[in-house]
Image (spheres, helix red, strand yellow):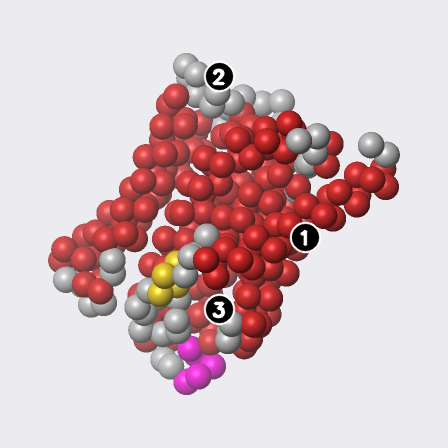
Amino acid sequence: MNRIDKKLLRMVLMALFAALAYLAPLVIHIPYPAPSGKPFVHPGNMVVVLAALLLGGWQGGLSGAIGLGLYDITQGYIIEAPKNMLLKFGIGFFTGLVFSRGRKNDGGKPRIPLFIISAVSFCLGGIILAGKISGWAGFEKVSFVAYLFMFILGLLLLLIALLSFKYPFFDRELMYAAMGSVTGMAWNLVGYFSTKVLGLLIQGSEFNAAVTTSLLSMPASIINAGFSIVGAIILYQPLKRALVKAGLGRALE
């Protein structure tokens, strides 16, 4: 495969992931009640993460920005499209950046960072659960799925770190794929929250009210993040092997 053919094939794969990113929220679209906006649970972000792991950061980010941007434009979210396109590009870019640099690093397996991320995930799930049980304002409306996903994510990352001591399957590549996925989705969560607060402030809300409303609108994004990370970790290596077996290995990142 010459250089031109490789570039052409990568463009084809980017277009394929863009199409999958567009179709994902059409196929799975679960509305989630929130005090502001119309958030919903969907697998589109997972497609962006997988594209970044397989093709590279900016390639995956561009695929996600195009696919999910077209979804917003055609499905009545045109006002939010520019913001979402930036966030989706960031998911791919930061996922690919951490994954690529970590995989090329000659150091050992990144167990300590995974332990830390796992602990943070458990803490977030515990906060949501405590708020729901204690009846904190707004938390009674939060679905159990939000904290369940946080607990599942924390457990998955913990298991990857622990099992890597004994089983070669949990190698550096898979562990950095997990870290890259977490980084990309962290960018999306922070970006969503920040832009939500800013938008409410522009509309005239007080700062405290804007922050509270934005926090109570986060569960759908948290579920999307957890689903995307777990799904990407599970699907990355099988999908990579399938592409290599199909003769497309040289087009991957």
Amino acid tagged 3 = Thr
| Mark 3, secondary structure of its residue | helix
Mark 1 and mark 3: Cα distance apart in space: 28 Å
Q: Which residue is mark 3?
A: 195
| Mark 2, secondary structure of its residue | loop
Mark 1, other Cα within 10 Å: few <14 / some 14–19 / many ≥20:
some
Q: Earlier in the sequence, mark 2 or mark 1?
A: 1
Q: Which residue is mark 2?
A: 168
Q: Residue 117's x, y, as percent? A: 40, 39
Name the mark nearer the viewer: 1 or 3: 1
In-front residue for pair 206/71: 71
Name the mark nearer the viewer: 3 or 2: 2
Horizontally, residue 45 falls left or right of residue 62, namely left
Q: Residue furthest top?
A: 166
Tell me if label 1 and label 3 are in contact, CB under 8 Å. Answer: no
Name the mark nearer the viewer: 2 or 1: 1
Report which quarter residue 160 is drawn in.
top left
Amino acid tagged 2 = Pro
What is the number of the mark on residue 15? 1
Q: Residue 240's x, y, as percent? A: 59, 32
| Mark 1, secondary structure of its residue | helix
Q: Residue 152's x, y, as percent? A: 31, 40
Amino acid tagged 1 = Ala
Q: Main secondary structure of the magenta part?
A: helix
Q: Earlier in the sequence, mark 3 or mark 2?
A: 2
In-front residue for pair 166/203: 166
Please give the range of residues in magenta: 200-204
Q: Which residue is found at the position 36% from the left and 40% from the top?
A: 153
- Is residue 129 shown in magenta? no
Q: Is residue 147 above or below residue 118?
A: below
What is the number of the mark on residue 98? none
Q: Is residue 210 above or below residue 5?
A: below
